[in-house]
Amino acid sequence: MTLARGIYGVYDRGGLADDALAHVARVLAEGLVCLQYRDKRTGRPDHELIADLQALCQAHDTRFIINDDWRLAAEVGADGVHLGQSDGDIAQARAALGPAASLGVSCQDRLDRAQRALAAGADHVSFGRFFVSTTKPDAPPADPAVLTRARSLSVPIVAIGGINAENAASLIAAGADLVAVSSALFAHADGPATARRLRALFARG
């Protein structure tokens, strides 16, 4: 299923003091397109937390995405998966998850990677990081011009990396269909207000 234009929330459990489910619910109530579950704390997925997040996403009509692990996404019946460059075979993930799943791939600043990902079965691609990121501090920087060039791909384009309500407008103007936001939404008490401000940027665009 094609992702709509708007906010791509990234719930990074490793950056939170606790599960913060009540806070997640308040953020989701502001109208996120999807929520990605990312958890690098241990080698084992937290199935109880995943189930709780899935239930919240269903209640708020938000697509639930698993980071990195398409096998886990298939196991829990997630709405999709997001794969990095070393997270497995894209065609295999598409075959396992089916045609209705959202399948995104990180492409850093490379259009050729995006083209290969789409040919293998991805339905949207992400570029970044564009700003300093606490989630992926070592990721190489990307120029927003790649978002403009990526419009030729005719698929949803996700911008990622250090994005908040103060800097997202430039990326939306450059061509991003979705902005992936993590700590600005989930690690701060004003996350719901941030979501409202981000939604307003898309409404103006």
Image (cartoon, rainbow, N blue to C red):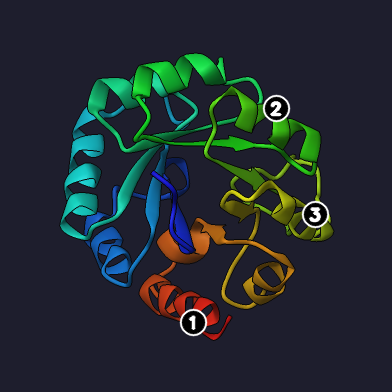
Judge whether residue 107 can be spotted in this image: yes
Q: Nearer the viewer, residue 127 or 43?
A: 127
Residue 39 falls in which quadrant of the image? top left
Q: Please tell me whether residue 77 is drawn above or below residue 204 in the rendered image.
A: above
Q: Earlier in the sequence, mark 3 or mark 2?
A: 2
Residue 116, numbered label: 2
Q: CA distance from mark 1 to mark 2?
A: 32 Å
- Where residue 2 sits in the image (x, y, percent)? 44, 48
Q: CA distance from mark 3 to mark 2?
A: 16 Å
Amino acid at the residue labelled 3: Arg
Count neighbours of disc 1 (C-alpha within 10 A) and say few if under 14, some if 14 to 19, many if 20 or more.
few
Q: CA distance from mark 1 to mark 3?
A: 23 Å
Q: Which residue is mark 1?
A: 203
- Where residue 78 sits in the image (x, y, percent)? 29, 34
Residue 83 falls in which quadrant of the image? top right
Q: Is residue 186 left or right of residue 85?
A: left
Instruction: Mark 1 vs mark 2: give the one in front.
Output: 2
Q: Please tell me whether residue 107 is drawn above or below residue 144 in the rendered image.
A: above
Q: Is residue 59 left or right of residue 128?
A: left
Residue under the point 63% across and 45% down: 126
Label 2, secondary structure: give it.
helix
Count neighbours of disc 2 (C-alpha within 10 A) and say few if under 14, some if 14 to 19, many if 20 or more.
few
Residue 26 falls in which quadrant of the image? bottom left
Q: Which residue is mark 3?
A: 149
Count neighbours of disc 3 (C-alpha within 10 A) and say few if under 14, some if 14 to 19, many if 20 or more.
few
Amino acid at the residue labelled 1: Ala
Residue under the point 26% across and 36% down: 50
